[in-house]
Image: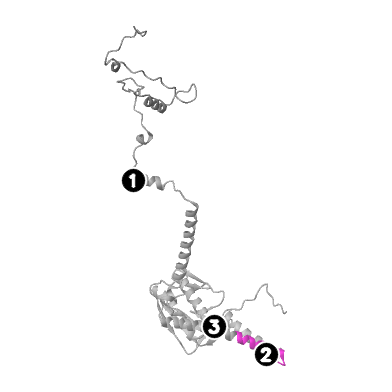
Amino acid sequence: MSTNDTPPEEPGAAAQRPKAQPPLEPPSGPVGQEPRPGQQERGREETGQAPVDDAPTGYVPTGPAQTTPEQSAPEQTGRQRLADGLWPPRVSRAQLIVAVLLFVLGLGLAIQVRSNSDSSALRGARQEDLVRILDELDGRTKRLEDEKQTLEDQRRELESSSNQAEEARKQTVEKERQLGILAGTVAAQGPGIVLKITDPKGQVQSDKLLDTLQELRAAGAEAIQINGVRIVADSYFSDEEDGVAIDGRKVTQPYEFKVIGKPQDLEPALNIPGGVVQSLEKEQAVVSVTRPAKIVVDALRAAKQPDYARSSSS
């Protein structure tokens, strides 16, 4: 009789007996710290235990469903995205510098175009008109050179003359005559033109007559008389109810300019493109220019005695 009282097992009993479960290993990590969810799942997988759900079977959440910010924000349209991209403007320093440079460039181009448009009248003129304008400029240059040469000759005569007092007296008399013509105190005669302006519509006013006078002076007119009124340095024009007044004296049409000067310079100056004649014709005035053999300007001005000014030689 054996000392082991354990009865022999029946065949198949070992297969029916449940296997002993190995003890669970404690989770790795600091003592007293609960294992993270991932560690619990790996521990169950290593031991062969089935995962255990925290929520009870058949649990259905009854609270409101949580949504992410992406799900809660409404979807924007293409126009809204475009507006968000354009406003507020996001301007960098480089873009600001480029904008300033483009503004300066545009301003320079505008100034250049405006300066070019100022000379458009001459650019569109005919070749004959350009030649006439060039001749007029050459004539003005020649007159200035002649005047300069005359003054130099007078200076040399004064320096080389044996009787300087007599020569000085002659030059003084000549200068007095010239100044008398310019001041309108003496009569004058010589070559020139007669300009007659007829204004049937009454559209020619004082400003047009003043422009005509200035153009004649620029062309070299030495003495001018309008309807019996001598034109001097301080002459002025004003509009009246049925005409124009010159130096306070009323004159009526036709306005007749008697001008002493070089006809080859005076007449072309009036007929340049956009000049006096075209400007008057736009006002429906009739303009005629003639060249008599001799022009006589006999309207005189009284010499004014200065109240305060005195000659420095007296």
162 drawn magenta: yes
Q: Position of residue 238 (x, y in %)?
A: 49, 70
Query: What crowding class fits label 1: few (fewer than 14 Cα within 10 Å), some (14-19), or many (20 or more)?
Result: few
Q: Position of residue 161 (x, y in %)?
A: 70, 92
Q: The residue tagged with tag 2: helix, strand or loop?
A: helix
Q: Is residue 89 above or below residue 293?
A: above
**Foreground pick, 204 / 82:** 82
Q: Nearer the viewer, mark 2 or mark 3?
A: 3
Q: Is residue 269 above or below residue 30?
A: below
Q: Position of residue 255 (x, y in %)?
A: 45, 78
**Foreground pick, 173 / 125:** 125
Label 1, on which residue?
78
The answer to whether residue 80 is left or right of residue 118 is left
**Foreground pick, 262 / 50:** 50
Q: Amino acid at mark 1?
A: Gly
Q: Nearer the viewer, mark 3 or mark 1?
A: 1
Q: Amino acid at mark 2?
A: Glu
Magenta residues span 148-164
Position of the C terminus by quadrant: bottom right
Label 3, on which residue?
141
Label 2, on which residue?
157
Name the residue: 54% across, 83% down: 141
The answer to whether residue 86 is left or right of residue 309 is left
Which sits earlier in the primary sequence, circle 1 or circle 2? 1
